Image (cartoon, rainbow, N blue to C red):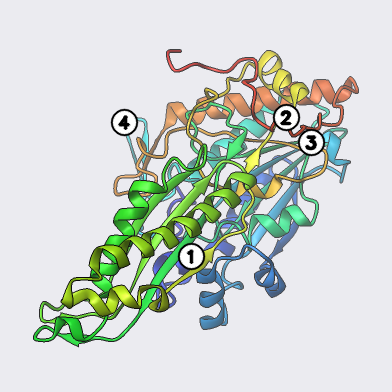
Amino acid sequence: MRLIGLPTAGPLEVGQDGPRPELWAAQRAYAEAAAELGFTVVHHAAADPAVLALDGVPVTVREAAAAMPDFLECQPSMVLRLGPELPAERTVMFNVHLDTVAGFEPPRYADGRFHGRGAIDAKGPAVALLAGLRAARAAAPALGERVGVLVQLVAGEEGGAMGVFGTRPLVAAGYTGRLNVFCEPTRQLLLPRSTAAATARISVAGQDSIDDRPGGGHNATVLLGHLAHHLARHLPGRVDGGRVCVAGLHTGTLHNKVYGSGHLLLNLAYPTTEAGLALQQALEDELRAALASFTDTFADLPDFALTAREAAQVTRLDWLKRGLPALASSDPWAERLLTEGAGLRYAPADADAFTCDAIWTHDAPGAYTVVYGPGDLDANGAHADGEHADLADLESFATGVRALLTTFARASEAGQPPAPVATTPDQPAGATTPAGSTSRTA
């Protein structure tokens, strides 16, 4: 309850004039509780500003950092370690984000349910993780001595930050393990996949006009509406696994003005890095086709002839976010350990994945990554009013953490963890359904 009671929504959620997140305090509070289990703080700092110059950083993050001198300083991340530093192949890493979306709700507990912002995404799972760690330590003395555990407590997961100044630099610094578990709501099903997304902005920068002379300028509303219609019809389905969200369209609010400028936003989610590149290229191709279609359709209409003639000249595509990797993790040894050994279950092979910070372990050497946690993003109101977490789900997740760690510790003590099996072009990562997967009818 103490953790949920600390407001930790970052500037990308509440705006640069909003209250600063109490992430320093939240991470210190968590570290105090973890210290009772033997964890020590090995890193607690804001990210180096240089991370914002790397490829893949969303434009919104760079703009916010430029406008707010304390943007990074108020959003630190922490790493806790149990026992001495050990090789990654003998280590399990857990990642949990303590920042939340906006809309703070005071914490309360009633009838077996925790209420409040972050209850399920992801402060509740963070506390349940501690319970699982406590139980695992009691059951497996090797933990913290010959088998290592790392816990990343990160900022910058929400608000579209994509982990670029939270998880990404921690992974780059080597705070990973042979197994990496990202604690997000998955109904306690193992998900070895995480999508990524690109955000496109189609802008029209033309000449305004008045309602008495609608053909005297460029009609951005009609042009962008046509482009949105075309892209909604022709872009989805172009790339296997890709998802297209035709999002905000804005030109103006007056009834007696022809707006010559405006923009349309699209979000393109993809399951693999290759699919992302293909989907971005498909958008560029379809945009050209949409502009040509607009010209053909409106060239002979006097009120839109100028817009039709100069559509390609006044329209521009730029990317607010792209170049992010996707995660598709595959490793037969780890899959057997988690299912046959720990008794955990995988999500169905065709289950929808979602975007989270797990993408940054896509190329971590010698590592296998899953997303795993209690509850459901939608059913538990993760980004909505009434966010909640059921005590029974949190306790069940803690039991799963215990099983995972004790099984890994036994395998590690027996010298079992091999290097992950490399995937090949004809066998993409995550293409097979691991043993222990559920089906749609399970």
Q: Which residue is mark 2?
A: 426
* Residue 5 rendering spot, x and y as whole percentages: 43, 54
| Residue drawn at 52 percent across, 77 percent down | 63
> Dot 2: few (<14), some (14–19), or many (≥20) neighbours within 10 Å?
few
As drawn, which residue projects farthest toward the right? Answer: 415
* Residue 328 rendering spot, x and y as whole percentages: 65, 37
> Dot 1: few (<14), some (14–19), or many (≥20) neighbours within 10 Å?
many
Amino acid type indicated by mark 3: Arg
**Spatial separation of the CA atoms under disc 2 and disc 4:** 51 Å
**Spatial separation of the CA atoms under disc 1 and disc 3:** 31 Å
Mark 1 vs mark 2: in front: 2
| Residue drawn at 46 percent across, 13 percent down | 442
- Kindly indicate the quadrant of the structure image that contains residue 434: top right
* Residue 298 rendering spot, x and y as whole percentages: 24, 67
Q: Which residue is mark 3?
A: 178
Q: Which residue is mark 4?
A: 111
Q: Which residue is mark 1?
A: 10
Mark 4 vs mark 3: in front: 3
* Residue 376 rendering spot, x and y as whole percentages: 42, 34
| Residue drawn at 91 percent across, 23 percent down | 415
- Kindly indicate the quadrant of the structure image that contains residue 46: bottom right
**Spatial separation of the CA atoms under disc 2 and disc 3:** 25 Å
**Spatial separation of the CA atoms under disc 4 and disc 3:** 39 Å
235 lies left or right of 404? left
Mark 1 touching mark 3, by CB under 8 A? no
